[in-house]
Amino acid sequence: GGPVLLKRQVIVTGDRVTGASSGFDQDSGSPAVFVNLDSQGARRMADITGDNIGQQMGVVFIENRTDTKVVDGELVEEKRRVEEVINVATIRDQLANRFQITGLDSSQEARNLALLLRAGALRAPMDIVEERTVGPSLGAENIQAGVNAAILGFVLVAVFMMIYYRVFGVIAVVALLSNLVLIVAVLSMLQATLTLPGIAGIVLTVGMAVDANVLIFERIREELANGMTPHAAIKAGYERAFATILDANITTLLAALALFAFGSGPIKGFAVTLSIGILASMFTAVMLSRALTNLVYGRRSRLKGLSI
């Protein structure tokens, strides 16, 4: 790029960087670099960035190079200092021990920037003997393994629900499928990238949605055992289990919001997916499953029993 004018004020040096990795911003899905600083670097970063929100901050890579040239027939080593601006970003908020750099053009640029930040943390000069680029096959395999685990978990849960709760189990499976469709639809609207933490959030949501249906169905069984008619048992089961389901989901939602507020990177991705899943499960496990139950049993005026 073109020349960049920077103020000669060093915020932190490379030895304060404890980690730097490339990934994707969970909000926009664009390439990003996640940076970790030690405690001293975090305090310095917080002091400077807190007073300069909206200003630009540059990352300068300094390399001490040794060149060899021939002088009067003899080889002479000449050391020189090379300074290169590798990134310029706008400070959006006060930064501390963990933050991310966004606005990068490609994943390759994010990987290169993370590599240079990690190299800047080395206390000794580094001579590159060999450099290789390894494809992201391991990450792709992990994602595929996570998807396979989620599918297997869904199938096992569906089989158990249909065997144990019969017709009501089928209703729960339909509601669960709708829950997954809603989650994927919302993530697509947000242009979010599906990561391993996101898959974990979806799997956890499946368990919570099934748990809500189990509470409702067991309540219906209790009401039937107490002598209620099938229609009255269905109504009482949904109404009396709702408070318990609401309390459990609100508690989990608050925990997810805390993870989003204080976490970064993959933790935020898990929190976003979990929050979407909780809201979707409240709709599908309570409202949609009740609508399906009414569709199956509501039109029968003389109902002698329930397949539950």
Image (spheres, grey):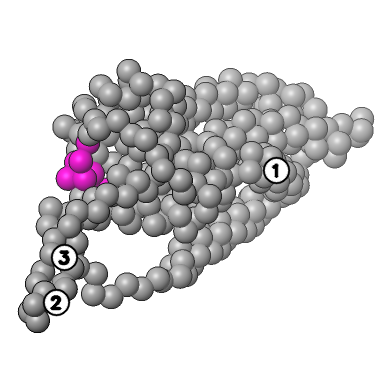
On the image, numbered disc 2 is attached to which residue?
70
CA neighbours of label 2 inside 10 A, class few (<14), some (14 to 19), many (20+):
few
How far across and down, in percent of the image, does residue 99 sit?
Answer: 36, 36
SS at circle 1: helix
Instruction: Tell me residue 61's x, y (percent).
Output: 28, 49
Q: Is residue 15 magenta?
A: yes
> Which residue range is magenta in the image?
11-19
| Tag in front: 2 or 1 | 2
- Residue beneath the point at 33% across and 34% down: 6
What residue do we see at 8% from left, 77% from top?
72
Res. 185 mark:
1
Among numbered discs 2 and 1, the one appearing first in the sequence: 2
Q: Amino acid at mark 1?
A: Ala
Compared with 154, 16 (above or below) is above
Residue 158, disc: none
* Residue 140 painted magenta: no
Q: Quadrant of residue 233?
A: top right
| Residue 272 location (% of width, % of height) | 53, 36
Residue picked out by circle 3: 66
Q: Tell me what residue is drawn at x 10 percent, y 69 percent.
A: 77
